[in-house]
Image (cartoon, helix red, strand yellow):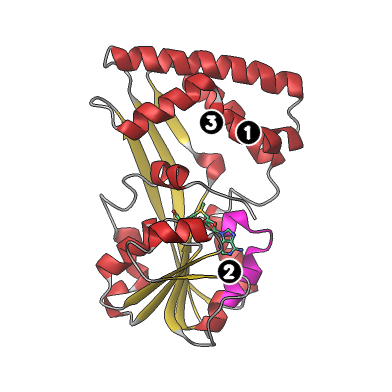
Amino acid sequence: MREFSESYLNRTREGMWDDSRRALEPLALESRDRILDVGCGTGELSRVLAAESPGDVIGCDADPGLLAAASEYVPTVAGDALRLPFPDDAFDLVVCQALLINLPDPAAAVAEFARVSTDLVAAVEPDNAAVEIDSSVDDEDRLERRARQAYLEGVDTDVTLGADTSEAFEAAELELLETRQYDHVRTVEPPYTESALAAARRKATGDGLADDRETMLAGELTEGEYDDLRGSWREMGRAVIEQMRDREYRREEVVPFYVTVGRVP
Ligand SMILES: C[S@@+](CC[C@H](N)C(=O)[O-])C[C@H]1O[C@@H](n2cnc3c(N)ncnc32)[C@H](O)[C@@H]1O
């Protein structure tokens, strides 16, 4: 199972769902009784569900360390998305966010969601091939594209699932209701947050890239190409930090997520 740190989830979900929750409308949160958030991680989506719904929300994840953070917002249960520790028909909405992109067989998970739902199943999944970056540091967009391409070539699950999540719903024999796009926009500008400063430091040390080294080398990238990329990456990180010192650094990242909703027949 792919592992995620609490700090990674906090950083990458920062501001998500703060500005608009329109893409969650098809989940009819206002009329739900019992909601399960599968692969809830630190509970970034669970807390939004709990705020928008009068129903009970439960978070479920295979990583007990992350569940400790999620339990600040909702009750949690440890469990595997492919063998949920709940009886049939225990919820009226089962939802996940950025879980299916990490599973080798997304349709099997969706079928398991359908087993424990009486009504709706939903998934909020990104298309990581379509991420857009606009940065005041010239090389940042080019290097991030290169790193992303190498990661996509090496990763063993479909992290570009996005709108194609509907195929997993069809394979699980759900009645497809709707797919809505939600662009998660993350902006870095002065005054810089602690997490923006930490992200810049991770660029300058190359630590962020090193986390994905193994995956990148599993694809077409050679060790030599990885070392060259890391060298340029660290240089770019130092340019980011310099611009931050002068309060000139600006970066906008748009990650397209797709909310797919289906009904249990
Ligand atoms: C990218 S994180 C997303 C977390 C959270 N939904 C969010 O959007 O912030 C993927 C999560 O799925 C969990 N996960 C991965 N495979 C799982 C499985 N088979 N069963 C349950 N949880 C799983 C991981 O532990 C992690 O918390």
Residue at mark 2 = 81
Examine the rendered structure and indicate whether residue 12 appears above or below residue 189: below
Residue placed at 61% from the left, 30% from the top? 210
In the rendered image, residue 97, in percent from the top left (x then y), is placed at 47, 59
The amino acid marked with disc number 3 is: Gly
Kindly identify the amino acid type of the residue bearing the numbered disc 2: Ala
Q: Which mark is residue 164?
A: none
Q: Is residue 9 above or below residue 65?
A: above
Identify residue for label 3. Answer: 208
Q: Is the residue marked 2 within 8 Å of ligand 1, measured from its CB?
A: yes
Q: Are marks 3 and 2 in contact (CB under 8 Å)?
A: no
Let me know if residue 34 is in the magenta part: no
- Please state which of residues 12 and 28 is positioned toward the viewer in this rendering: 12
Cα–Cα span, label 2 and label 1: 28 Å
Between 213 and 106, the one lying in front of the other is: 213
Residue closer to the observer: 112 or 9: 9
Q: Position of residue 218 (x, y in %)?
A: 75, 37
Query: Is residue 106 covered in magenta?
Result: yes
Residue 149 is marked as: 1
* Label 1 packing within 10 angstroms: few (<14), some (14-19), many (20+): some
Bounds of the magenta span? 100-112
At which x and y percent is residue 207?
A: 55, 28
> Does residue 124 appear in this view?
no
